[in-house]
Amino acid sequence: MPSLWMLKDRFHGNVLPLDVPRPITMTILEGLRYLHTQCHVIHTDLKSDNIMMALRDPSVLDTVAQDETKSPIPQKQLPDRTIYLSRNDFGLEAKGLGRPVITDYGLAVRKDGPPHDHLIQPDGDRAPEVVLKAGWSYSADIWNLGALIWDLSQGHGPFDTAKSDTSESTDEAHLASIIPRLGPPPLDLIQRVAKRSRYFDDEGHFNAPDLVRQTEGLKAIDLDVEDAEKQAFIEFISKMLRW
C-alpha cells in the first residue's frame, strides 16, 4: 500500500487537484465516525503518512516485482535486517486509487472519561485546545483532517510557522498563525485554559499581537476552480478548522 504522502509527492508542488482528495476525505470521515462512535477512540496523529491507499488493481504489484528483479532499489544492510527504499510507482489517476485506510494507532487514546490534556499532534497541525491544554476530545481528529485537506490542496499546512528554539515561543507562534485564519478565540475556550495569563490578558486579548501576521483567513486558500466550488470547499473546511 502506498501512503497518501507518497501519492501527494508525485504531483507538481505536492498539490492534488480537488477531484482526488474529495473521495478520500469522505472515506476518512466515515472511518473517523466509526472510530469515534463505535470504538470511542481518538487517533491523535492523523496525517498523510498514516493514511494508506489501497490498490484497486493488484496487478500493479506484479509490475513492481518485475521491476525489482530487473533493477533492484537501493537497500541498507543492518546486522538484523535489510532496509529497502520505498517504491512510489503506483500511478496518479484518481480512478486507480483504492479506499484510504487510517493506520498507525500507536498514539491513539480512548475517550472513556473527561477530556484529555496531554500534548498530541505535530506542532504545525496541533489543535488550539491541545496547545492551550483546555481539554481535547474527538474534535482534535477532525481538526487534523481539516489541516490534512488544506495541505493536500495547497502543498503546505494552513498554520505553518517557522520553527523556534523553545516550546513556549512555538506555542505562541502557532496560536498567532491560527488567529488570523479563524479570528480571535471565543471567551468560553479562554476560560478553560488553566494558564491563560500566559497567552491572554484579562480581557481575552492575545498577549503576543506582534506575532500575528495579516491574512484573509481561510478565504485566502488558492484553488484553481470555479468560485462556487471554492466557496463550497471553504465552507466545508471551516467546519473542521474552528475554535
Image (cartoon, helix red, strand yellow):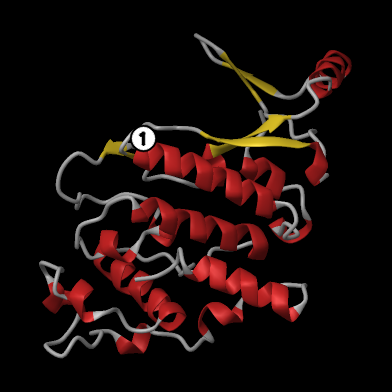
What kind of residue is marked 1? Gln
Q: Residue 3 appears in which quarter of the rendering?
A: top right
Within 10 angstroms of label 1, few (less than 14), some, or many (20 or more) residues?
Answer: few
The C terminus lies in quadrant? bottom left
Q: Position of residue 109 (x, y in %)?
A: 28, 37
- Residue at 46% from the left image edge and 46% from the top image edge: 46
| Farthest-out residue, front | 38
Name the residue tied to disc 1. 38
Residue 44, compared with residue 54, is above or below; it is below
- Residue at 45% from the left image edge and 43% from the top image edge: 32
Q: Position of residue 145 (x, y in %)?
A: 49, 54
- Residue at 80% from the left image edge and 26% from the top image edge: 57
Asked whether, in this view, residue 208 is left or right of residue 85, the answer is left
In this view, the residue in front, 85 or 235, is 235
In this view, the residue in front, 139 or 71, is 139
Residue 102, compared with residue 167, is above or below; it is above
Residue 155, compared with residue 66, is above or below; it is below
Q: Is residue 37 visible?
A: yes
Q: Position of residue 58 (x, y in %)?
A: 78, 21
Q: Position of residue 75 (x, y in %)?
A: 67, 21
Q: Is residue 92 visible?
A: no
